[in-house]
Amino acid sequence: MSRLIDLSHTVEHGMVTYRGLPAPLICDFLSREDSRRLYATGTEFHIGKIEMVANTGTYLDSPFHRYADGKDLSQLPLESVADLDAIVVRAPDESGRSIDAGAFRGLDLRGKAVLVHTGWSRHWRTDQYFEGHSFLTAEAAALLRDQGAALVGIDSLNIDDNSSGERPVHSTLLRHDIPRGATPRWASPRGAPALPRPQHEPCRAARSNERNKDSDPPLTPLRNGSKGSQ
C-alpha cells in the first residue's frame, strides 16, 4: 500500500530559516470578524496573507536560481521532479562536514533523485543549524552530473560550503538542469540500521510500499526560480 510522508516543518510567523534572509510574515488579510460586514448575515470568510522569500523551509532550486538564462520551475517537466526513483545516501555529519565524490562512486545514479541524509536536521530551530553544516564538494557535484543524477537533495542548511562566496555545487548542478532540493529533514527508512557513511538505500521519491521502505514526496517549490542568499 502506498503512502506519503510529509518531510517539511511548519512555517511559522517570524521563523528564521537562513541567516540574512527575512523571516516569513503570516497574518490575516481579511479576518472573519471584518468579513461579516461584506457578506450576508451568517456568512463569513477568512483570507490569510503569507509573505516570504522563496528559500523558506522545504523548497526546490531551479536553474534560474543560479543562471539568468536557466529554466524556472514552470519550465521544468513535472516528471523531472516528481515520482522519481531515488537513492538515499547516508553521510552522517559526525564523519566530517564535506561529502566528497567517494560517497557516490559506484552507485547507479542515472535518472534518480539522490537524497543525501546527513542528520543535520536535528539542529533545526537552534543556533547550531546555521554553523558548521554538512555540504557536498565540487568533485561530488561533478560526479553526480556525469553519472546522470536527475535531482539532488540534502537535509542541511546549504548544499555548498557557505564560508566563501563560491557555490560550485549549485553552479554545476543547476547549469546542467539538475534541480537542487533542500529540506529540513529526510524521512528515514523504517528499520534501517545506523551504519557508517556512506550507506546507500534505494527508495521511491514519492511513494513507498512493502518493498520500498522509504517515502519521499516531491519537494514543493514556493515560487518560480527560488532565489535568495544561498
Image: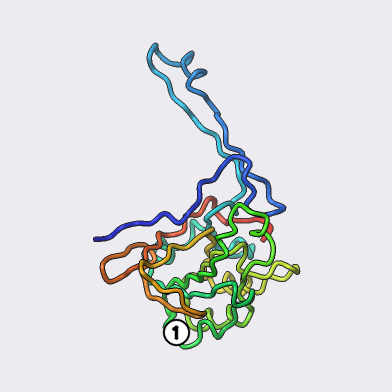
- In percent of the image, x 66 and y 61: which residue is there? 230
Quarter location, residue 95: bottom right
Tell me the quarter of the image containing the N terminus.
bottom left
Per the image, the residue denoted by label 1 is: 107
Q: Position of residue 209 (x, y in %)?
A: 27, 65
Specify the farthest residue to the bottom.
Answer: 106
Tell whether 87 sits left or right of 103: left
Specify the farthest residue to the left.
Answer: 1
Quarter location, residue 174: bottom right
Quarter location, residue 24: top right
Instruction: From the viewer's side, name the closer residue of 97 and 41.
Output: 97
Tell whether 168 sits left or right of 107: right
Residue 192 versus residue 4 in the image, above or below:
below
What amino acid is labelled 1 in the image?
Answer: Leu
Q: Position of residue 188 (x, y in %)?
A: 42, 65
- In percent of the image, x 57 and y 83: which residue is there? 101
Circle 1 crowding by C-alpha within 10 Å: few under 14, some 14–19, many from 20: few
Residue 45 versus residue 119 in the image, above or below:
above
Secondary element at tag 1: loop
Q: Position of residue 28 (x, y in %)?
A: 55, 29
Tell whether 104 sits left or right of 132: left
Q: State the scheme by which the image is colored.
A: rainbow
Q: Position of residue 212 (x, y in %)?
A: 31, 70
Tell whether 84 sits left or right of 94: left
Instruction: From the viewer's side, name the closer residue of 66 and 190.
Output: 190
